[in-house]
Amino acid sequence: MKHRLIASVMTRDVVAVERGTPLKEAADLLARHRVSGLPVVDEDEQVLGVVSLTDLTLRQAGQGIDPPAGWVARLSRGARRDHALRAKAGARTAGELMSSPAVTVGPRQTVVDAARLMAAHNVERLPVIDEEGRLTGIVTRRDLLGVFLRSDEEIRREVIDEVLVRALWLPPQYLRVDVREGVVTLTGKLPRRSEIRIAERLTERVDGVAGVIAELGYEEDDSHLQPTERALHGIAEEWMRKL
């Protein structure tokens, strides 16, 4: 089951700055466009880094003072960023203030990939780059949130089309599929017991699904069969390895 690709949710009209852009201009752009970060690009649209509200806050906090060791430690979570924080305090351009290298994502990666990167690096947005590193868009946490705002009917159609028809090779009406507030209830009887697990796991992977309730029975108990025997009975070994 494939998740939505970044290309389908990203914003293509990106506000960016260059390395030499003055900080005042970068701050004005952040405020005017109501964004939390700006990609910094070179003349070839290669992404060099990102200037964020956090970077500007650190710069303002350190302006004109020599930060106490305790203050630096709290902000940097370690002495290795001490030098970088002090450098930001004297920054005058986007290139001097930016966080680099930028955490980026590709248009063919999934919303799950983007969510994991955002969580791991504690960032609100990711520049989207092509194979040559050029800026093609931007994806934000708000963009990813849209995946979970899919209508119940849209989720229901995808479960039927992708799980029942394409994955399990069953007629669309074979099971009853009900969706309420993102929770999918599967009701009915599948041909084989092993297909229950497959149906549950694949339904869980549909974007926007908040939970799965499987009220499923089976006509044949194939739990005692070896993987090769299951394949002969209609259960592909590839599916069993993935789940």
Image (cartoon, rainbow, N blue to C red):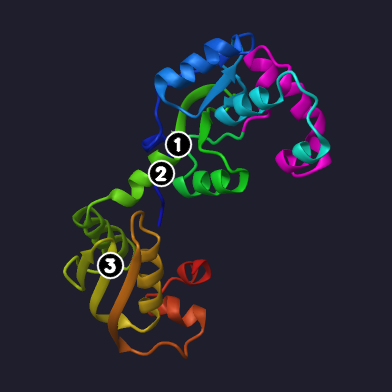
Tag 3 or tag 1, which sits nearer the N-term? Answer: 1
Q: Which residue is mark 1?
A: 140
Instruction: Report how far apart the C-alphas of labels 3 and 2 lie in the structure.
Output: 20 Å
Under tag 2, what secondary structure?
Answer: helix
Residue type for callout 2: Leu
Determine the image quadrant of residue 66.
top right
In this rendering, position of residue 130 left or right of residue 180: right
In this rendering, position of residue 83 left or right of residue 120: right
The spot of residue 26 in percent (x, y) is 54, 15
Q: Which residue is mark 2?
A: 144
Residues in magenta?
73-102
Tag 2 or tag 3, which sits nearer the N-term? Answer: 2
The spot of residue 147 in percent (x, y) is 35, 48
Q: Is residue 12 magenta?
A: no
The residue lying at 61 percent from left, 48 percent from top is 120
The residue lying at 74 percent from left, 44 percent from top is 77
Label 2 near label 1: C-beta < 8 Å? yes
Residue type for callout 1: Thr
Q: Residue 29 versus residue 38: which sits nearer the camera?
A: 29
Q: Nearer the viewer, mark 1 or mark 3?
A: 1
Under tag 1, what secondary structure?
Answer: strand
